[in-house]
Image (cartoon, helix red, strand yellow):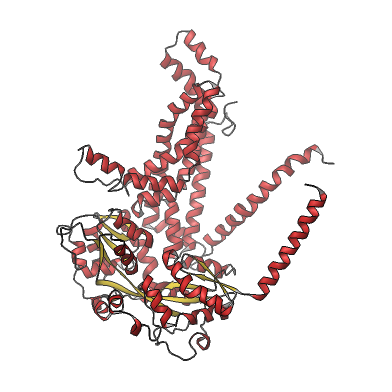
């Protein structure tokens, strides 16, 4: 390389840098952290692109949802996210530790249209979902399991099972299988739950940790019955895979959007949150992912066929239990350790 | 003008800098976190002492690392002997065959094992087709799967380390033993094997240290019932939210590694473990 080339390179570099800074001065890009996968593609098409077109604010999506990452970023003062998805127990933990920014509801929901359950001090409920039993429809000779008791019944429904590698919800499922009524679950009878889990342990071939694994285990035949998030199964059914879910005994949960403490563009993030209130966009999202939120007017726009596969359909709500994140926020560390020890024994 | 004595430190500077930024600084941070828990400086240590999980997982990890090391040495030694015995022109081809899997991503190789070992995988399909079993057997998520995966990943390390030492040996000594009337077995046992000892020790050390920190293979092929220390650290960080305990475990892992290195250096003090058998 000659000296003249070097000079040209340096000039070019300077020009590039200048362009970069001017572009940045004009437009803000917010970083939105979510659970990734196919849902991320739907969010990009339905919410992110139109939002950027309308406001000029760019949206960059990252994954996965992780309380540990949030903690690390808050504590090191290096916040990458402007908005993050969060589960119920994580939400409580994050609020308790002061890792979140208060929502300015005058930006997100100025007309006060959201129901109170969705309007919380540090987060907005964006969706509802359920952890349910999924099973292979081709493995039980036409019979279909109907409950957690059937999940435990390896004589009538033989074959390996799959459960999450976590005590969260599995203790509830064990108690439901043991005959505890859904409204009498909390506070959990931990001893009774682990005793019941002892019965199923050697039939559980795999302990999943991610959503992708849940369905992979069923499709590969590694398990004939296992727990999944309700939205993972409809796409498989569409592909003709022999799987179905049971709502009975499902764990109905809320999922949040929250602005982390130290977020660089909290105002822009909250403007983006507002777009989640649009019922037409909500219906579009439901076509891809049956996790409805509380956007006003959303349910009225849903077709009856789609409504049936939503966790908040009245028939489905009636048979599920309502997951208690407060209980788990308090007891998760201790019970997770006991769970890990139990798995090793 | 550079003086000669300055060249070596200057050449080492980038590496030292890298080491300082990406190892020493995080290490100090881990030290700090493990003694700065919410419940006092010794919270991490007292967790290590009292936790029913840590003791079991730690012993399991040691056992796993030991058995993987032994299996790799037993399988790798004859292969290395064979390769070292080839003429230099052909040795390259054999080494390439060893290096090819070595250069393939650990993740890819681990996933491939889960396809082979699964209930509806290659192995079960073959066994059923051959009539050896009628029902699919459980291979995946067992200690067997973890061992297979780790041995396959680490075997090239064993072979390459051993070949390095074996090709440096004076083959004339073995020939001399044979000429003087030793049987092939005796020549091997009394002449060849002792000469390769530094290679065996170096390979054992590398394999043991690498096995201690294995994360993805035990997680994917073994599952939570076959957790290693690395998996338990992950569980502490992500599920139990206890970074003090996680950092304390990381320190234990480091201490175990240092102890293993010290033990092996003590076993073969007369040789340079890193430079082969010169």
Please state if B93 lies on the left or on the right of A1 as rendered: left
Residue A84, image x, y percentages: 49, 72
Would residue B157 be seen by someone viewing this image from the given angle? no
Camera-side residue of A221 and B180:
A221
Side (left or right) of A250 relative to B162: left
Q: Describe residue B278's horizontal placement relative to residue A308 as left or right.
A: right
Q: Residue furthest right?
A: B1
Q: How many marks?
A: 0
Q: Where does the image place residue B48, in percent across and percent down from the top left?
A: 43, 56
The spot of residue A288 in percent (x, y) is 38, 70
Please, is residue B262 above or below residue A195 in the view?
above
Name the residue rendered at 70%, 43% in the picture. B12
Residue at 76% over, 40% down: B7
Question: In the rendered image, which quarter is residue A281 located in?
Answer: bottom left
The spot of residue A304 in percent (x, y) is 28, 79
Q: Residue furthest top?
A: B180
Q: Quadrant of the C terminus of chain A?
A: bottom left
Does residue A332 appear in this view?
Answer: yes
């Amino acid at each position: 390389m000659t000296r003249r080339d070097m000079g040209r390179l340096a000039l070019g570099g300077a020009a590039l840098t200048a362009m970069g800074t001017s572009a940045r001065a004009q437009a803000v890009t917010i970083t939105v952290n979510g659970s990734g996968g196919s849902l991320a593609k739907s969010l990009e098409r339905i919410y992110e692109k139109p939002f950027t077109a309308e406001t000029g604010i760019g949206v960059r999506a990252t994954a996965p949802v992780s309380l540990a990452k949030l903690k690390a970023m808050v504590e090191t003062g290096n916040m990458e996210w402007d908005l993050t998805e969060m589960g119920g127990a994580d939400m409580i933990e994050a609020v308790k530790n002061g890792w979140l920014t208060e929502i300015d509801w005058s930006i997100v929901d100025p007309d006060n249209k959201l129901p109170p359950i969705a309007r919380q001090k540090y987060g907005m409920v964006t969706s509802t979902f359920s952890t349910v039993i999924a099973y292979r429809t081709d493995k039980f000779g036409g019979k279909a399991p109907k409950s957690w008791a059937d999940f435990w019944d390896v004589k009538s429904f033989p074959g390996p099972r799959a459960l999450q590698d976590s005590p969260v919800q599995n203790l509830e499922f064990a108690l439901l299988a043991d005959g505890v009524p859904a409204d009498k679950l909390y506070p959990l009878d931990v001893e009774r739950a682990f005793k019941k889990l002892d019965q199923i342990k050697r039939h559980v071939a795999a302990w999943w940790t991610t959503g992708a694994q849940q369905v992979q285990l069923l499709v590969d035949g590694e398990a004939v019955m296992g727990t999944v998030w309700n939205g993972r199964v409809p796409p498989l059914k569409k592909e003709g895979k022999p799987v179905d879910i049971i709502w009975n005994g499902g764990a109905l949960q809320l999922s949040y959007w929250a602005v982390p403490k130290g977020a660089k563009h909290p105002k822009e993030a909250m403007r983006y949150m507002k777009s989640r209130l649009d019922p037409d966009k909500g219906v579009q999202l439901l076509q891809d992912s049956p996790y409805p939120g509380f956007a006003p007017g959303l349910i009225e726009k849903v077709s009856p066929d789609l409504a049936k596969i939503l966790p908040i359909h009245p028939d489905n709500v009636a048979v599920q239990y309502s997951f208690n994140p407060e209980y788990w926020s308090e007891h998760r560390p201790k019970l997770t350790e006991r769970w890990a020890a139990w798995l090793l024994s | 003008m550079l003086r000669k004595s300055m060249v070596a430190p200057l050449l080492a500077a980038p590496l030292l800098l890298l080491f300082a930024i990406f190892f020493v600084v995080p290490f100090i941070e881990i030290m700090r976190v493990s003694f700065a828990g919410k419940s006092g400086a010794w919270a991490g240590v007292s967790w290590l002492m009292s936790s029913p999980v840590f003791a079991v997982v730690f012993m399991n990890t040691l056992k796993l690392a030991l058995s993987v090391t032994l299996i790799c040495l037993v399988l790798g030694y004859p292969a290395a002997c064979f390769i070292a015995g080839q003429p230099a022109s052909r040795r390259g081809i054999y080494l390439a065959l060893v290096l090819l899997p070595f250069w393939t991503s650990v993740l890819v190789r681990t996933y491939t094992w889960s396809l082979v070992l699964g209930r509806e995988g290659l192995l079960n399909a073959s066994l059923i087709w051959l009539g050896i079993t009628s029902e699919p057997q459980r291979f995946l998520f067992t200690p067997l799967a973890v061992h297979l995966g780790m041995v396959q990943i680490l075997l090239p390390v064993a072979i390459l380390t051993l070949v390095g030492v074996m090709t440096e040996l004076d083959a004339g000594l073995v020939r001399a033993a044979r000429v003087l009337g030793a049987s092939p077995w005796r020549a091997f046992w009394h002449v060849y094997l002792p000469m390769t000892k530094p290679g065996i020790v170096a390979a054992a050390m590398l394999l043991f240290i690498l096995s201690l920190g294995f994360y993805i293979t035990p997680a994917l092929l073994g599952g939570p019932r076959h957790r290693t220390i690395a998996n338990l650290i992950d569980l502490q960080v992500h599920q139990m939210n206890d970074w003090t305990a996680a950092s304390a475990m990381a320190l234990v892992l480091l201490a175990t590694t240092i102890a293993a290195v010290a033990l092996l250096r003590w076993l073969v003090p007369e040789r340079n473990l890193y430079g082969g058998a010169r």
